[in-house]
Image: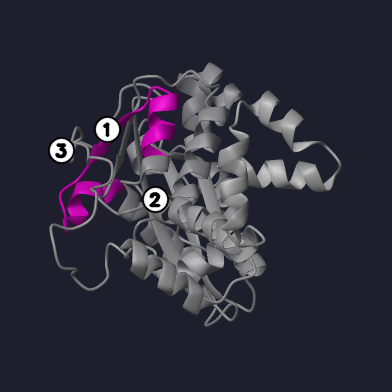
Amino acid sequence: MMFPLVRELAVDGIPVTVTCRVLKLCRQQYYRWLDTPFTDGQLDEAWLANAIFDAHRDDPEFGYRFLADEVRLDDHDVSDRVVWRICRDNGWWSRFGKPKRGKGSKPGAPSHDDLVRRDFTAKAPNVVWVTDITEHWTDEGKLYCCAIKDLYSNRIVGWAIDSRMKARLVVAAIEMAVARRGGDVAGCIVHSDRGSQFRSRKVHRALTRHGLVGSMGQVGSAGDNAAMESFFALLQKNVLDRHPRWSTRDELRIEIVTWIERTYHQRRRQPALGRLTPIEYEMINTPQTATAA
């Protein structure tokens, strides 16, 4: 609809005849529209609905309250109630909400087959990565950490930490892993569970963009991602449970990053690596990979 633009230009002094000729619009149709135009409120709500739909499409598990938070981050001054009404009118419900009548919503990106099948070994770097998300409470609320481990050396090649468990958390970890490995990671398997973040379109696009191959364990089977579960168990024991409570997210964030980069990578020797640390193992066996990371 270009008629609002014609009206705005007319207010600025540009003749309607000139604008309609340039935009190839019919003046008669413009004047008919001008008799019953859309109100500014209707236009604002249309822009708001577009923003809500974009947020819902990227994270279909979000309910209307989370969607309201997302659009407010994009400078939309709106109440939760208005967002609920727009979601209701358009049928944009959380994937985990109450069952709706009818055939259901449009499915998300397809899940991947299990290409690892509990064989948590790799003969070279960037052959198999495993990933998962963990969470922990602070006085400011939850903090989420997504980590990616290379099964060749057990090194954490990518991680991301945020206050929200969204698809962008996984995408940030993937981008970090690709950058630290020099960018040439095409064909590498990225194995995860079937959480909604890993099945999102954003993550699917990130995998495709870098030539990565998705892999997923079965629903409700923690053993299908045991290599990542074991890392998070170490993180839980050595960092998260070390204090009865954490005051701020930043405090916990610093502790997690310090433990991964300083203790786990450089000081924690692993029997599976011949009593070497992940950094030492890569420096000895694949120095070009260790240097790139």
Position of 157 relative to 248 (above/below): above
Look at mark 2 in the image and give the residue it sits on.
57
What is the magenta range?
203-227
Q: Nearer the viewer, mark 3 or mark 2?
A: 2
Residue 42 in the image: x percent, y percent?
Answer: 55, 62
Residue at image position (48%, 19%) is 286
Q: Nearer the viewer, mark 2 or mark 1?
A: 2
Badge 3 element: loop
Q: Amino acid at mark 1?
A: Thr
Residue at image position (27%, 67%) is 96
Few, some or many residues within 10 Å of mark 2 (<14, 14–19, 20+): some
Q: Amino acid at mark 3?
A: Arg
Residue 47 in the image: x percent, y percent?
Answer: 56, 55
The residues bearing labels 3 and 2 have C-alpha atoms spaced at a distance of 31 Å
Look at mark 1 in the image and give the residue it sits on.
121
In the foreground, 65 or 48: 48
In the foreground, 36 or 277: 36
Work out whether residue 37 can be spotted: no
Badge 1 element: loop
Look at mark 3 in the image and give the residue it sits on.
117
